[in-house]
Image: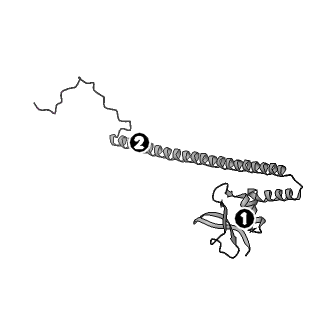
Amino acid sequence: MSTCIRLARRGKKNSAFYHIVVAETTSPRDGRFIEKIGYYNPVRNPEQIELDTDKALRWMDNGARPSETVRTIFSRAGVLYKRHLLRGVKLGKVTAEEADVKYRKFLTDLLAKTEMKRKKITDVIKEKTEKINEEEKKIRKKKFEKIMEKKAAEDKARVENALSETGTGETPEATPVQEPGSEEPSKDIQG
């Protein structure tokens, strides 16, 4: 039987998670497999790829064909580049040390790109949260201003009602405050 390297879906609904497996071509997608060589998580941003490169290379050398999606994943993870370098070593066009240096440089560049992407994403998230916070502050300020305007209108209406009850058109005078100890005896008290 021929073998292929493909994805086997795992995870919950709307949050896919894939195992990269070596399976027979006739077995179902999520069914039996020969060996699991890694996983792929497209939900995370940037996507997460964990892969055993040596196993993938061994299976590809033994004739396992990767699916189109897995080929793309292998390309991003550097498996195809390492295979290319190893072919050059076999043909004698590149030494093993040069191939190792090139592959390490590729991995450091890949790591740097991933970190830049992660930083860019966190910066965008930070900007959006700051923008949302500013908008929320503006909304709260508008609500506060509306409440204060409403209270001012109620106070003004109360004052106008008090003026209309007195009938003078002037503001009612405040009752004088008496100092303690200068109280006049109340006339209401009988005695």
Q: Residue drawn at (18%, 30%), measured in percent from left and top?
A: 186
Bounds of the magenta segment: 184-191
Q: Is residue 28 left or right of residue 99?
A: left
Residue in front for this viewpoint, 99 or 28: 99
Q: Which residue is mark 1?
A: 70
Instruction: Name the residue: 74% across, 60% down.
Output: 74
From the top left corner, tell me how far across and down residue 53 is, in percent: 73, 58
User: Which amino acid type corresponds to the residue marked 2 in the rendered image?
Assistant: Asp
Q: Residue at x 57, y 46 (%)?
A: 133
Split into 4 quadrants, where in the image is the N terminus?
Answer: bottom right
- Residue 186 colored in magenta in the image: yes
- Which residue is the extreme one toward the top? 181
Q: Which residue is mark 2?
A: 155
Q: Nearer the viewer, residue 188 or 170?
A: 188
Q: Residue 160 is drawn in which quadrant? A: top left
**Picture quarter with the C terminus:** top left
What is the crowding at mark 2: few (fewer than 14 residues within 10 Å), some, or many (at least 20)?
few
